Image (cartoon, rainbow, N blue to C red):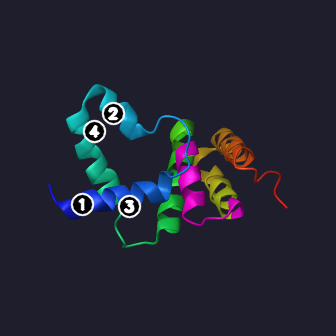
């Protein structure tokens, strides 16, 4: 295992998820299979999310859009935190969620906006100006 990938994984995880409360996916995976959890983390966080082909804010907005359309609200909450941590504004995140209404429908958009509002309330960023 490359020391470089391990360091990238730690650095990227700290950047994205430094102040996220609750169980993170790695912790869940580790409870079932610590070796596989490590492999998944090294790939997802250390290789995929650490890639520099697009900026971290863009990567997180894409992730927010995909999770919104799929109505994966628990994972969406995690990535809204990550998007804010890498510099996305609440307004940018909301705009991406609104954009997905065309593809995911109104109910998915509404649930995602509620999730965004919940995260912003947790962070003391609600109401918006």
Left-right relation of 13 to 77: left
Tell me, yes or no, whether the two marked residues, 4 and 3, touch with CB atoms within 8 Å. Answer: no
Separation (CA) of disc 1 from disc 2: 19 Å
SS label for mark 2: helix
Residue 89 coordinates in the image, percent (x, y): 67, 64
Sequence-earlier tag: 2 or 3: 3
Residue carrying label 3: 11
Tell me, yes or no, whether the two marked residues, 2 and 4, touch with CB atoms within 8 Å. Answer: yes
Q: Is residue 28 above or below residue 81?
A: above
Separation (CA) of disc 1 from disc 4: 15 Å
SS label for mark 3: helix
Q: Residue furthest top?
A: 32
- Residue at the spot x=66%, y=42% of the render? 115
Residue 118 coordinates in the image, percent (x, y): 70, 42
Residue 108 coordinates in the image, percent (x, y): 63, 41
Left-right relation of 4 to 109: left
Which mark is on residue 5? 1
Sequence-earlier tag: 1 or 4: 1
Left-right relation of 53 to 19: left
Q: Is residue 14 above or below residue 77?
A: below
Magenta region, residue range: 77-91
Separation (CA) of disc 1 from disc 3: 10 Å
Query: Within the image, what quadrant is residue 6 found in?
Result: bottom left
Residue carrying label 4: 37
Which mark is on residue 13? none
Sequence-earlier tag: 2 or 4: 2
Residue carrying label 2: 29
């Amino acid at each position: 295992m490359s020391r470089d990938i391990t360091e990238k994984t730690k650095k990227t995880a700290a950047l994205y998820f430094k102040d996220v409360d609750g169980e993170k996916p790695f912790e869940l995976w580790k409870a079932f299979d610590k070796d596989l959890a490590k492999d998944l983390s090294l790939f997802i966080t250390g290789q995929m999310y650490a890639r520099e082909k697009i900026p971290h804010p863009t990567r997180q907005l894409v992730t927010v859009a995909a999770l919104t359309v799929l109505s994966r609200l628990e994972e969406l909450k995690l990535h809204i935190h990550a998007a804010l941590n890498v510099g996305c504004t609440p307004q940018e995140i909301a705009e991406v969620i609104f954009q997905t209404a065309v593809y995911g429908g109104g109910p998915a958009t509404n649930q995602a906006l509620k999730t965004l509002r919940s995260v912003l309330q947790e962070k003391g960023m609600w109401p918006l100006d």
